[in-house]
Image: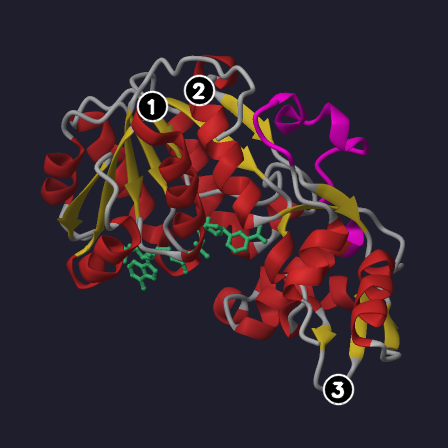
Amino acid sequence: MSSVAKPQPTYKNIALVGGSGNLAAHIIEAFKQAGSEFNVTILTRHESIDKARKAIEGYSQFDIKGVDYTDKHSIVQALVGQEVAISLLAYAAFAYQPTIIEAAIEADVKWFIPSEFGVDVERHPNKTLPMFAQKLRARELLESQSKLAYTYILVGEFADVFVLPLFGIDFEKRTVNIPGKGTVPITFTSQSDIGKYTVAVLRRLPQFKNKSVLFGSFIASYDDWIAEIEQATGAKFTVIHEPLEELESRVSSYIRDKSTAYQLHAISDQIRFANGSGTVLLGPDINTYDSASFNEVVPETLHEVATRVIPK
Ligand SMILES: NC(=O)c1ccc[n+]([C@@H]2O[C@H](COP(=O)([O-])OP(=O)(O)OC[C@H]3O[C@@H](n4cnc5c(N)ncnc54)[C@H](OP(=O)(O)O)[C@@H]3O)[C@@H](O)[C@H]2O)c1
């Protein structure tokens, strides 16, 4: 455990909603390291309870409650006594977030952290992208009431899932399809760092009342990733530059006709358009991000993450 002095949290009773997922596993890991600083209650669907139970085996600071996201009463009951609720729901479950926010208000929860963990959705063109509509809806709800304080956690792109066809990186074909210029900077945070930074934010929550908190492990471009990929694999990748105007034209068609906007290829286009537009960058200097002042966390570097995730 780190010997760096840490602030004392104002709120200790934390609920993780959707607590059996991918990001949740990293946040749970960080809570394990925090020991008795927090009491953590995992809200999870009944079918996910066994998975959640395995994740916390042997750690006494955790509790698990089964819920049904279509039944507000079950969520209110599970949230009674909780001070902070962190929603970790997946994209496929964003439609349940308004119910969870209403349940948190009814249960007298003090603070809500919605399932954001991405880009600044208020920024253009992010704000126009159908894939972010539900995140904006949750923001509207939170900003239209005064009982729950809220904080939006922004992380840019998850660093450890970037080398995937969804982002234009194909290891089988050895190709990288770059949206626009390869030099455009993007903010990346590894999920392990998101876990540690989230716990660090909970130690300092009043500083981030009703605003965004910026996380970042490092800033890198597609070109930086290609250099890491070619070094790690010893192979040369074929690089294709897709003009941003072509991506923009497809993205405009999803905005006009939302029926295809949520298919995988359309999500890929929207993410890559944001990447190429430079709006996944949360700020030009990582040292000015909020996470840079969380002294108890040493962020991962591009090289460390790349070494861990690039298939050899
Ligand atoms: N910036 C990035 O690059 C990036 C990348 C990936 C994700 N994210 C964000 O990170 C957050 C968490 O994502 P994740 O990847 O950790 O999500 P995930 O593992 O796919 O799912 C999280 C939880 O959502 C619930 N869930 C999933 N599908 C559901 C369905 N069909 N019906 C009801 N509930 C469902 C489950 O809750 P139970 O535990 O109750 O079963 C699951 O454990 C999201 O806000 C996402 O947008 C950002």
Q: Identify which residue is drawn at 45% across, 51% down.
A: 23
Residue 216: x percent and y percent?
66, 38
Mark sitting earlier along the chain (1/3):
1
Name the amino acid type tagged 2.
Arg
Mark 1 vs 2: CB contact within 8 A: yes
Q: Identify which residue is drawn at 38% across, 46% down.
A: 88
**Image height check: is 199 above or below 92?**
above
How far apart are the alpha carbons under marks 3 and 2?
A: 45 Å
Q: Nearer the viewer, residue 55 or 223?
A: 55
Left or right: residue 207 compared with residue 93 = right
How far apart are the alpha carbons under marks 1 and 2?
A: 9 Å
Task: Identify the magenta region.
Answer: 276-298
Q: Which residue is mark 3?
A: 173
- Name the chief secondary structure element in magenta: loop
Question: Which label sits in the foreground, 1 or 3?
Answer: 1
Name the amino acid type tagged 1.
Glu
Residue 292: x percent and y percent?
67, 26
Q: Answer few, some or many: residues within 10 Å of disc 2's Cα (few below 14, many 20 plus, some between 14 and 19).
A: many
Residue 251: x percent and y percent?
67, 63
Name the amino acid type tagged 3.
Lys
Q: Which residue is mark 1?
A: 37
Mark sitting earlier along the chain (3/2):
3
